[in-house]
Amino acid sequence: MGKKKKKKHKADQKAKTAQPLEQQAPEYLAAGRFRQAVNAYKELFKTDPETYRPHLRASYEGLYKQRLQKGMVQEAAMVLDQIEKLAGNMPCAESIRLWCKRQQFAKAAQVAADVLGAPDALPGQDAALVADALITAFDEMPRPTGLSDPIIGELERIQSALKAVAEQSYGLALGAIKPIGLRSIFISWKWLIKGLCAFYAHEDSKALAAFEKIVAGTVPGAFAAPYARLLANNTGEKGATKEPAALEAVCAAAGYETIAPAIARADYLWNVQRFRDSHVHLMAALDSFPNFSTGLERTLTQLYYNAVFEMPFEQAQKYIRHLADSAFRHKNDNPIEQLWAQRTVALYTQVNSQADGPVMDRWEEFIDLHALIYGESPTVRALVYHRLGDFFATQAPDDMPSPFFFGRRRRKRPIFRNPELARRCYEKSLEANPDAKDTQLSLIRFYETNGDAGKVNKLLDRLVKQFPGEKDVLFKAGQRCLERKALLKALGYLEQALALDPMDKMVRENFIVACITAARNYASKRQAVKSRELLPRVIDASDAHSDDFNRGRAYLYLRWAAFEQLNGDSARADAMWAQAKAQRPGGEIKLHYFYWILARYYGVPSRSIETSEELVRNSLKAPVDVAIAVDFADTLLYMRRLPESHLLLAGEIGPIYRYIARAVKLEMKRPQAKSIMTYALSDCCENPALAVACADKMLQCNPGDAYFRFYRYLAQPEGGRALTSKKELDELKTILQLAREQQENTVAIQVQKRLKELEATDPLAPGNSPFGDMPEDDELDDDELDDELIKALMNGFRPPRRSSSTPRRSKAGKKKSSPPGPQQLELF
Amino acid sequence: MNPYDILGVPPEADDGALRSAYLEAIKRFPPERHPERFTAISEAYQALKDEKSRLHYELFDMKSGVASPMEAVVRHFAWSEKRTPPDFESLKRKLRECACR
């Protein structure tokens, strides 16, 4: 302490001594400065014993508890003597603590009995102390004397109930404590037993409720605390304890008493990000860590050997080096640790390495190590090489076909990560396990993408012979034949695949495509019988009452009708028409519009489609019906995928647009408006103003509709602004928030992408970042966004549909992004 | 949490045993009453359903499953079928430890 400080301290002391003791003493007591409080009250006690006796006793009691807490048992005992003198050598409840601290439970119980026998009423806290002492004495000798019969009865009930809990006789335990009332000194023990019975019977909320009723600071309270914490953790409550002793107690309550200290320490080190120390600690403390078995140790193994994939880069680098050093240090004879470490290193290299050599090397080291420990395993070798093959056969992100893309585009040659290594790995995998069907299918996909048609056909032929009863092999062979226009062969394979799994939609759709294409070929060659043979099989595979243009039974009957017209059999065609109508009652205009366009495309004579044409034309002139407008929009969107559709649909675009434009002014349901929006943003629509009108109409009813708000934003002209305005960013941020709230995931992804584009072009972006509130999105680039979209798709959300091979831009340069629509195989 | 413990099967369990364990588990924890548990059971079964899936899981799975050692304990506790109380002597010892504090 410096001179100045010393001087100041002395001056303070002087000032304080000058204050009257009456003022100082309560201040010391209130501040927990019990030594000073005792001294002050001692002086005051000399002047007026009766007034200051309780205060002096309270000061002594504070000092006594303080010393006990610090483990100063001897010193506490001396203070206790003073307390007892003050009480006129009456039994003092506080001495129970001392005896307990000295583990002399019989003496503690005797004091408790004496306190209970004293004439004064017990304060609440002392009553709990007395109860705890009586219970925890259990069968210690000598037994306390002077207890009343009711107390002895309750005491025995609690002790027998505790024994019953330990023996898992929960009914017996609950029965024993039933007569104990709320006013009993043993009430906290009753709640403890109730809570424990519920806990071991898996009635967690009941247990937690019972534990919460126990008085704090008592033995039952201390005993129940880890159970309550465990249940709170289990029910997902936050704010769990981080104190090692408490963690140990929680572990013990969870049934892991023997390893509790190790887990508590490892957890502490893990939470302060000392991952390596935590791993070292657990390695030293647990014999069965790491392992490939089950149980807690297995879960811990997964945590310690897989956590590296979730760590920040620098920490991950250090940690992976540590795992490798630990496993392959001199004289380490723990093969399981070595295998886990080698596995982690290989996976980590695969995820992070730019070069291909190290990835291959690490996995080959893993195979060798595995063989050394468990003996050569062709299955493991085949699986590792298959995975490596898939890894090297991944296409560069720019080359991946976009999930948005629906138009035709000249196919670029794919850029694989390393085609040579991919081929070599697949071959090695097949060398190890020639019967690996999945590896052969992967190799076929690789050759297919690479354009090696000859190799694909050869491998497929072999595969079909090797696995004649496998659905995926037959399906692949069918698809391949379909691509090669070997329709009958395709039909054979797909029919077999369908027989194996009639519910598989993809197989069914491919089968329908093959059948219809073949039937059309026969029909155009006037081979009516052959054409007719195929079509009932199509109907069997179709979906009844479905509105799907490919699988829907009504539309397949219409195709059949068109083929019958090609065969020159109008009567049969009419019969098919009747079947189609039966499948879609009340929606005939859609059928006629579909038939009118498709029959023309198939080359059906115009006199045979006059009825449909007339009905469509009349509908277009009649008062507008929103449902019919939606039917027109859907059909037109499907039909635009026909080859040369622009010629076929040239006369349709204008009238249909005008009809739908009139419909937009009427009341629409949300799904109807979404269909019209899809049409309005596609190439079929000649004026983007329709999209704005449709969105405005819907936004009048619900201004917070994220879907329409975003597509209105996309459709409206930008006014030629060169720079991104704050208003535009704000609007996008609002839409993003709304989309998240309304779970419009596709919209949310597109808004994020648009925001990123704007930030990239906006020089003010660093100071006015729209991403400030969503850091998780910052790291995503465009390719990752595509992955997100695929994820969204897999979760049932549809992809946004791009209407042509070149992305359209509105007048002001905004990319025109169509709303989601269904994905379909081409079947015409 | 590892899928073996989720389904309550040993690592050497065959396809049949795994399927039985899976069917029993989803019967006990239907999705409408235990959605999280049902998802975990389904994912565990997908990871272990046949020999190839099991090997794939052992070799290539990169998920830690839990965020800390203590969370591993809590998860295992939550999934454990049987909770066993300490014997009477241990119970007495623990209660006395609490009294000594």
Image (cartoon, helix red, strand yellow):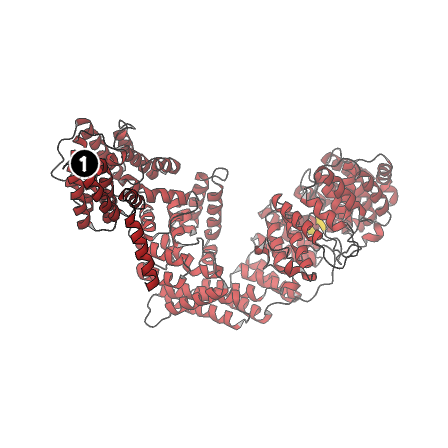
- Please tell me which residue is depicted at 41% across the width and 65% down the height of the picture: A341
The residue carrying pointer 1 sits among few (fewer than 14), some (14 to 19) or many (20 or more) residues within 10 Å by Cα, namely: many
Q: Is residue A569 above or below residue A309?
A: above
Q: Which residue is mark 1?
A: A112
Can residue A6 be seen here? The reply is yes
How many numbered marks are there? 1
The percent coordinates of residue A617 (x first, y second) are 86, 39
- Please tell me which residue is depicted at 28% across the width and 42% down the height of the picture: A22
Foreground: A512 or A342? A342
Can residue A403 be seen here? The reply is no
Foreground: A731 or A740? A731
The percent coordinates of residue A677 (x first, y second) are 74, 45
The percent coordinates of residue A751 (x first, y second) are 66, 52
- Find residue A399 and report its image quarter: bottom right
- Please tell me which residue is depicted at 74% across the width and 63% down the height of the picture: A410
Indicate the quadrant containing the N terminus of chain A: top left, top right, bottom left or bottom right. bottom left
The percent coordinates of residue A721 (x first, y second) are 77, 57
Q: Is residue A792 above or below residue A574?
A: below
Q: Is residue A588 left or right of residue A60?
A: right
- Find residue A665 and report its image quarter: top right
Question: Furthest-left residue in view?
Answer: A142
Tag 1 secondary structure: helix
Question: Furthest-front residue in view?
Answer: A18
- Find residue A261 and report its image quarter: bottom left
Kind of residue at badge 1: Ala
Q: Is residue A679 left or right of residue A13?
A: right
Q: Is residue A267 left or right of residue A827?
A: left
Foreground: A723 or A54? A54
**The residue marked by circle 1 belongs to what chain?**
A
